[in-house]
Amino acid sequence: GNSVTQMEGPVTLSEEAFLTINCTYTATGYPSLFWYVQYPGEGLQLLLKATKADDKGSNKGFEATYRKETTSFHLEKGSVQVSDSAVYFCALSGGNTGNQFYFGTGTSLTVIP
Amino acid sequence: SQTIHQWPATLVQPVGSPLSLECTVEGTSNPNLYWYRQAAGRGLQLLFYSVGIGQISSEVPQNLSASRPQDRQFILSSKKLLLSDSGFYLCAWSARGRGWTEAFFGQGTRLTVV
């Protein structure tokens, strides 16, 4: 079946540190992959996406590359800021998911000054 | 542009009372619609999704139900709330038939059952 496995949190980093949040997936067909961000008390916002193998999604300094050979879509940022503190969700859709979205469990990130 | 509206933002209801949460989408036609629940500190649980008017798929058996009376309206209901129904409820939509497109989320409803 389809599933997303995401790095457990919480993650605490100092400002300007390097961030990696691991995400691996299981899916049939050729899904699209997404990273969403959720700030406290709000809904999810799309952070970036990739629709095919080797695509790199990027936004606001965050990047993730769709690796079909390792079934991974790790989120990275070179220098985090306090304002990046949020919960991050990896997700997949498309392929043979039948219009459904599959989300990881979320990783809470706290950036301290 | 497309927008999604979800209300109310917060709700406190006694155990055993009914529930109705509403979600509407503007600026698009024939969307896929979703209801998710997020328990405190937990991930997203898909409750219902719909690919058309009157077409509802339930992912988790429970005392909640969903209806889609109009193309861009999705309602989450319960006849009698339980304490365990407390959580953050999120409505979302995606474009029909385009597996590569993302889901767009509403701002959520914080439900506390007391």
Image: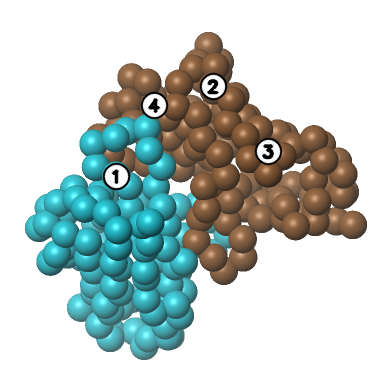
On the picture, is A29 further left or further right than B88?
A: left
On screen, residue A87 above or below A4: below
Image quarter of residue B12: bottom left
Colour cyan maps to chain: B
Of the two numbered discs 4 and 3 in the rendering, the one whose residue sits closer to the viewer: 3
Q: Earlier in the sequence, mark 4 or mark 2?
A: 4
Specify whether residue B68 is in view. yes
Q: Which chain is brown?
A: A
Question: What residue does disc 1 label?
Answer: B95
Residue A107 is situated, as x and y percent measured from the top left of the image, at 63, 47
Residue type, mark 4 in image: Pro
Q: Chain of mark 1?
A: B
Q: Which mark is residue A31?
A: 4
Task: State whether residue A88 is above or below residue B113.
Answer: above
Distance from disc 1 to disc 2, alpha carbons, whole Å, reads 21 Å
Asked if both marks, 1 and 2, belong to the same chain, the answer given is no
**Residue underneath mark 2:** A55
